[in-house]
């Protein structure tokens, strides 16, 4: 990163203030064009066609998003190469964030200005300075596309909740000690749509195809397979302990004692146990009207 910063400083020194001023002057010329872009009916239809739900992704914290490539593809489908992100100077680092400002120009008309950001740590071997800069540029693209109305359903609560119910699920992360989000396996969604009466072959996108290439995320075989138990308590035994609890406090005690055993179970067994635990908890709450929040560990 140090070398990259030195190179940037050198380039800025060579370019001097004249280039910066010329850029600002050109942008000022574009200001009168802001908000004047016109679209044909066909272009509007392509630009604002509904989201392909199978391409939506979800972060572990539950935030759904579309990869930046979806935004780029949509712009190319409508405008070809008649659009561009215009960078304002060089990227800057603020703390552990890379910040880079861009203007969006389409057919020579100014269509927005946005700041892209990307987290960067010098000791992260998986992301170089160049990778982080590209990440900031991609982030700016998604923000600028949002400002012109692309994929706004991603910020509509009704859409988010419906998408999560259909395509995503929570799971217990033993190492982090909390529930996280992930997309459901392709088979699960296919069955769900079949049961609800969806006819024909469900149109899975590339986002779901990755599940077929990563079956170990949901099933484990061979040398890497996890045992069905931990040598002391099997999934069936833990399930029975949960079902036989007499009170909510009893359930909490059982979970506090045995929840770490989940690490030795298969993903399917873990999910079944978590469902059983949550169902039993709700039964106790319904009976006693107790509203204390049980976070899955204590």
Image (cartoon, rainbow, N blue to C red):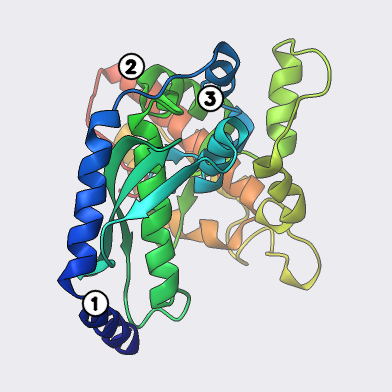
- Asked if residue 224 lies left or right of residue 138, the reply is right
Q: Quadrant of residue 258?
A: bottom left
**Observer-nearest residue: 73 or 185?**
73
Whether residues under marks 3 and 2 lie with C-beta atoms below 8 angstroms apart, the answer is no
Mark 2 element type? helix
Q: Quadrant of residue 94?
A: bottom left
Q: Mark 2 highlights which residue?
A: 287
Q: Position of residue 265 (x, y in %)?
A: 61, 57
Q: Is residue 26 above or below residue 176?
A: above
Whichever of callouts 3 and 2 sits on the residue coming sooner in the sequence is 3
Whether residues under marks 2 and 1 lie with C-beta atoms below 8 angstroms apart, the answer is no
The alpha-carbon separation of the residues under discs 3 and 2 comes to 52 Å
Please identify the quadrant where the N terminus is shown. bottom left
Decide: few, some or many residues near mark 2? Use Cα within 10 Å; few <14, some 14-19, many ≥20.
few
Decide: few, some or many residues near mark 3? Use Cα within 10 Å; few <14, some 14-19, many ≥20.
many
- In the rendered structure, find residue 47 and report the number of the disc placed on it: 3
Q: Nearer the viewer, mark 3 or mark 2?
A: 3
Question: At x 39% / y 56%, what residue is drawn?
Answer: 137
Query: In this orientation, does residue 180 appear?
Result: no
The alpha-carbon separation of the residues under discs 2 and 1 comes to 69 Å
């Amino acid at each position: 990163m140090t070398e990259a910063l030195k190179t940037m400083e050198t380039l800025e020194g060579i370019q001097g203030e004249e280039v910066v001023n010329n850029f600002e002057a050109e942008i000022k010329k574009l200001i009168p064009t802001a908000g004047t872009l016109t679209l044909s009916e066909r272009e509007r239809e392509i630009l604002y066609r509904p989201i392909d739900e199978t391409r939506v992704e979800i972060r572990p914290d539950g935030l759904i998003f579309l990869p930046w490539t979806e935004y780029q593809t949509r712009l190319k489908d409508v405008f070809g190469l008649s659009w561009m992100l215009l960078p304002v100077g060089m990227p800057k680092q603020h703390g552990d964030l890379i910040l880079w400002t861009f203007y969006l120009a389409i057919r020579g008309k100014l269509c927005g200005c946005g700041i892209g950001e990307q987290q960067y740590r010098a000791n992260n071997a998986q992301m170089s300075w160049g990778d982080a800069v590209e990440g900031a540029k991609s982030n700016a693209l998604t923000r600028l596309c949002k400002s012109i109305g692309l994929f706004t359903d991603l910020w509509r609560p009704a859409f988010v909740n419906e998408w999560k119910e259909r395509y995503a699920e929570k799971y217990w992360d033993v190492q982090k000690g909390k529930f996280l989000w992930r997309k459901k396996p392709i088979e699960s969604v296919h069955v769900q749509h079949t049961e609800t009466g969806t006819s024909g072959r469900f149109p899975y996108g590339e986002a779901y195809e990755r599940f077929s290439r990563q079956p170990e995320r949901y099933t484990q075989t061979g040398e890497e397979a996890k045992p069905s138990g931990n040598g002391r308590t099997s999934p069936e035994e833990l399930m029975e302990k949960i079902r036989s609890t007499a009170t909510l406090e009893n359930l909490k005690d059982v979970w506090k004692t045995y929840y770490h055993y989940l690490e030795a179970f298969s993903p399917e067994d873990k999910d079944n146990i978590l469902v059983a635990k949550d169902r039993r908890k709700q039964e106790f709450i319904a009976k006693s009207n107790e509203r204390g929040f049980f976070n899955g560990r204590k």
